[in-house]
Amino acid sequence: MRAGYGARGVIYMIVGGLALLAAFKSTQASGTKDALAALRDEPYGVPALFAIGLGLLAYLVWRVTAGVKDVEDHGTDAEGLFARLGQIVTGLIHGGIGISVLALAMSGKNSGGSSAQDWTQKLMAMPGGRYIVAAGALILLGAGVYYAYKGWSGKYKGHLARTHFTESIDPVVKIGLVIYGAILGLVAFSLGYAALTANPEQAGGLGEALQSLRGMAFGQFLLGGAGLGLIGFAIYNFVEAGYRVIPKFSDPDIRTLLD
C-alpha cells in the first residue's frame, strides 16, 4: 500500500512540476507517458522507473486484496460492493500502468503521440467500439466527480490519521483532490467527444488536457494552477502512504482528521 501510493505520488509530482514549468516557458505540458519518458533520460532515471513500476504493481496487489478481503470494512450491501469493485478496477488499471513503466525502463522505447488516441483507435476498431469508448468516458467522468467531491466534502479525512503534519497539510490535499478531479473531467470530455464524432484524434490524455488549458483565456495561469493542483494531488498520495488508517489493521483508538 505504502509503495503504491508513493509511486503514484512520484508520478504526479513529475507531471505537476512539468506542467508548472510549461506555464512559464515555451515547453509542452506533458502527460504521464511523456513525463516518465523524460525521467528515463535523467541520472538514475532507469532505477527510478523500476521503483515506480514495482510500486504500481504493489498498488495493484493492495487494491485487489482490499477489494476482495474488504480490509476497509465497506460491507456487502450494494454501495459496499460497488466501492470494493472500484478498488479492484483501479488496482488493475494501475497494474497495467506499472507494466508499461517497467517496459519503458527496460526498452527505453517511447512511441510518442498520445496513448489515449492509440487506445481509442484500437477500441473503435472493435465491434461496438464507440460505445465502449463512450462508456469509458462516463466512468472517467464519474471518477473525476468522485475525486472532486471527495476533496470538497473532506470525505478523505476519515481514513487519514490526525497528526500535526496531516492537519497542517490538509488544505493542500483538499485543493489537490479537487483540481485532479477537474482535470479527469477534461480528459473524460475529450474521450466522449471522440466517441460522438467517431474520431480517435479527438481523444486526449492528461497531457492534452493540460495543454488545452494553456489555449484558454488566462491559460498560463490555468496551466500553472493545474500544475500546482497535481503537485497537491501528489502530496495527497504521499500522505496516504504514510498516514492511511485501515480499519482491520490500524489501532482502533487512532484518531482521524474527522475526529
Image (cartoon, rainbow, N blue to C red):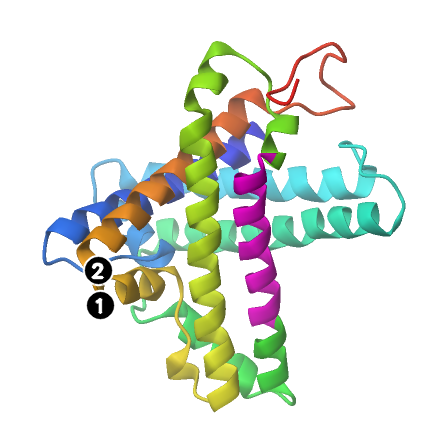
Image quarter of residue 131: bottom right
From where the camera sits, is residue 121 visible?
A: no
Residue 152 is inside the magenta segment: yes
Residue 195 point in image, percent of width and height: 52, 83
Give the quarter of the figure containing the N terminus: top right
- Badge 2 amino acid: Gly
Check the image and report above or below for 12 versus 109.
Answer: above
Q: Is the magenta stretch mostly helix, strand or loop?
A: helix
Residues tagged 2 and 1 counted as in contact (Cβ below 8 A): yes
User: CA–CA distance between discs 2 and 1?
Assistant: 6 Å
Image quarter of residue 218: bottom left
Disc assigned to residue 215: 1
Residue 176 point in image, percent of width and height: 42, 40
**Which segment did they paint magenta?**
136-154
Residue at image location 53% in from the left, 27% down from the top = 241
Circle 2 residue: 219
Residue 94 is inside the magenta segment: no
- Badge 1 amino acid: Gly
Residue at image location 37% in from the left, 82% down from the top = 201
